[in-house]
Image (cartoon, rainbow, N blue to C red):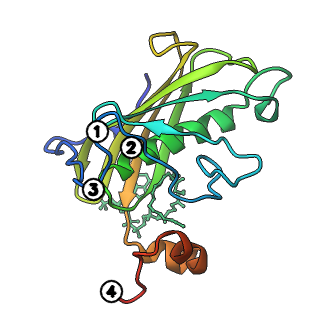
Amino acid sequence: MTRSTLTTPPPGAEPPKTHPDGPSAGGSLGSHFSRCFGCGDDHPTGLHIAAVTPDGASVEAAFTVGESHQGAPGLAHGGVLASAMDEVIGMSIWLLRKPYVTARLETDYLLPVPVGTTLHLRAWCTGIAGRKAYLEAEGRVGAPGGPVAVRAAALFIEVDMTHFAEHGDLAALQAEHQDYEVNP
Ligand SMILES: CCCCCCCC/C=C\CCCCCCCC(=O)SCCNC(=O)CCNC(=O)[C@H](O)C(C)(C)COP(=O)(O)OP(=O)(O)OC[C@H]1O[C@@H](n2cnc3c(N)ncnc32)[C@H](O)[C@@H]1OP(=O)(O)O
């Protein structure tokens, strides 16, 4: 795939160290926020992506393209597919149990994806350098070994939990992350 230097781990980048509190091999990841567009159960028009980790380090999910995901008639909207990539990549870095946000997301569209297609998504981290995490994802048509329709590479940046409190909805954060303290 075409991947820029900005999403390529630099020399000296380290492999990710998964956190003991994260799910073990074969475990489900769950949603990080009930109203998240990507994974929230309570989002009325969200993607409702539910992922598992086969090995404790990467994530896998199946996402079926629906009527509400169209761009051209009968075909998935590219932005929706990029959202699905962003979500599974975000889920894979959350295995480290440190908060990260997307700084850069590069997406390659290799095949048109008709409504009704199930994309088998996979995401993994290729390296950590300071606050920067380098990640990749792919979406394969119909089966985990099917043809690749979408590929992505991303740069995520580690933030403090105060990022979400200062810029987002503190009450919603505290409601679903009871362990979050404003002044720990
Ligand atoms: C209610 C519950 C919530 C709980 C949450 C729990 C955790 C989450 C769990 C699970 C997630 C599941 C999945 C979620 C969904 C997917 C994730 C998203 O979509 S996130 C939303 C979109 N992204 C943003 O809104 C970021 C907006 N941008 C920013 O806030 C800042 O720009 C930020 C934090 C990315 C960087 O700002 P700075 O001030 O902290 O740091 P600086 O110095 O600017 O950058 C640090 C380094 O990174 C490079 N950098 C930054 N942005 C870059 C870019 N776009 N391209 C290349 N390099 C970049 C810089 O050049 C710098 O590098 P040098 O240290 O100098 O080498």
- Give the Cα distance between marks 3 and 4: 19 Å
Q: Nearer the viewer, residue 173 or 89?
A: 173
User: Which residue is at 31% across, 54% downward?
Assistant: 132
| Dot placed on the residue nearer the N-terminal end, 3 or 2 | 3
| Dot placed on the residue nearer the N-terminal end, 2 or 1 | 1
| Residue at mark 3 | 21
Count of numbered marks: 4
Judge the density around disc 1: few (<14), some (14-19), many (≥20) Cα neighbours within 10 Å.
Answer: many
- Give the Cα distance between marks 1 and 3: 13 Å
- Give the Cα distance between marks 1 and 4: 29 Å
From the viewer's perspective, is the residue at label 3 or at label 2 nearer? Answer: 3
Check whether the beta carbons of the residues at disc 2 and disc 1 lie within 8 A of each other.
yes
Query: Dot 1: what SS?
Result: loop
| Dot placed on the residue nearer the N-terminal end, 4 or 2 | 2
| Dot placed on the residue nearer the N-terminal end, 1 or 4 | 1
- Location of ligand 1 given as a quarter of the image: bottom left
Type of amino acid under label 1: Ala
Judge the density around disc 4: few (<14), some (14-19), many (≥20) Cα neighbours within 10 Å.
Answer: few
Type of amino acid under label 3: Asp
Check whether the beta carbons of the residues at disc 4 and disc 2 lie within 8 A of each other.
no
Query: Dot 2: what SS?
Result: helix
| Residue at mark 2 | 92
Type of amino acid under label 2: Ser
User: Which residue is at 70% across, 46% downward?
Assistant: 46
Disc ID at residue 184: 4
Check whether the beta carbons of the residues at disc 3 and disc 2 lie within 8 A of each other.
no
- Give the Cα distance between marks 3 and 2: 14 Å
From the viewer's perspective, is the residue at label 3 or at label 4 nearer? Answer: 3
User: Which residue is at 77% across, 50% downward?
Assistant: 44
Check whether the beta carbons of the residues at disc 1 and disc 3 lie within 8 A of each other.
no
| Direction from residue 80 to residue 121 in the image, left or right | left
| Direction from residue 23 to residue 154 in the image, left or right | right
